[in-house]
Amino acid sequence: MSVQEESMRNENVPEKSITECEVMVMKCIWFRESACTASGILVDLEERYQKCWKPQTISTFLRRLVDKGYLSMERSGRTFLYTPLVSELDYGREQIEKCAEFWSANDADLFLAARNRQRPITTEEAARIRALLDSIGK
C-alpha cells in the first residue's frame, strides 16, 4: 500500500478483509442496530438472504469477525451478544473507495459512468454531485 493510499484509508475499518458470507452476517447485525445473539442472526440470514446455515457455521463467522476486529463479543448468561465495532457507513465507504481505485484507477468519470449504467442517477443525486464538485473546486 502506498503512502497516499495509507493516508486515505478509513481508520475505523480494520485492515483485515472479510468474506462475502461475513459481510452478510455483518449486514444482519447492522440491520438490528443493537447487540444480538447468534440465534437472532441465524433467523435474519434465513429471512434476508435465504441462507440455511447451521449454528456452528454462524459461530465460526462470528468468531472470525471478532478476531478481525469487526465485532465485540460479550457474555450474557448462557449466550453471547455481538456488537459491531465498525459502522455500516464506514465499511461501505471503504469498499467503494477500494472498488473505485481498483476498477476505475480513481477516475471519477469512469466510476460515475459505471454507476449510472447500473441505475440512472436521479435528478436529486445529480444536484448533490454538482454541489460536491462545486465545493471541491473552491
Image (spheres, rainbow, N blue to C red):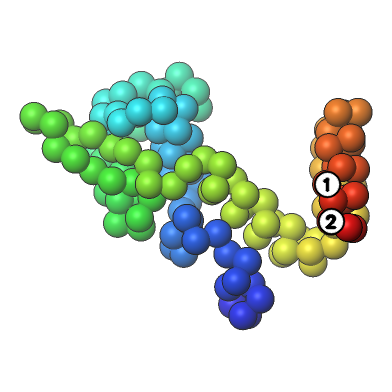
Tag of residue 132: 1
Residue 28 visible from this viewpoint:
no
Query: Which dot marks residue 136?
Result: 2
Residue 14 tag number: none
Q: As shown in the figure, which amino acid type bears the numbered disc 2?
A: Ile
Determine whether 104 is above or below 24 in the image: below
The residue under the point 45% across, 33% down is 30
Tell me whether the residue at label 2 lies in contact with that at label 1, contact meaning CB atoms closer than 8 angstroms.
Answer: yes
Crowding near the residue tagged with mark 1, few <14, some 14–19, many ≥20 C-alpha atoms within 10 Å: few
Tell me: residue 54, above or below residue 5. above
Does residue 61 appear to the left or right of 122 in the view shown? Answer: left
Tell me if 40 is positioned left or right of 136 in this view: left
Judge by depth and name the residue closer to the eye, 81 or 51.
81
> For this view, does 111 lie left or right of residue 45?
right
| Residue in the image at 88% along x and 58% along y | 138
Q: Residues within 10 Å of mark 2 (few under 14, many from 20)?
A: few
Front position in the image: 85 or 52 = 85
Residue 58 drawn at (x, y percent): 31, 38
SS for callout 2: helix
The residue closer to the viewer here, 99 or 8, is 8
Whether 119 is drawn above or below 67: the answer is above
Q: Is residue 91 visible?
A: yes
Q: Is residue 86 above or below residue 36?
A: below
Q: Residue at x 90, y 58 (%)?
A: 137
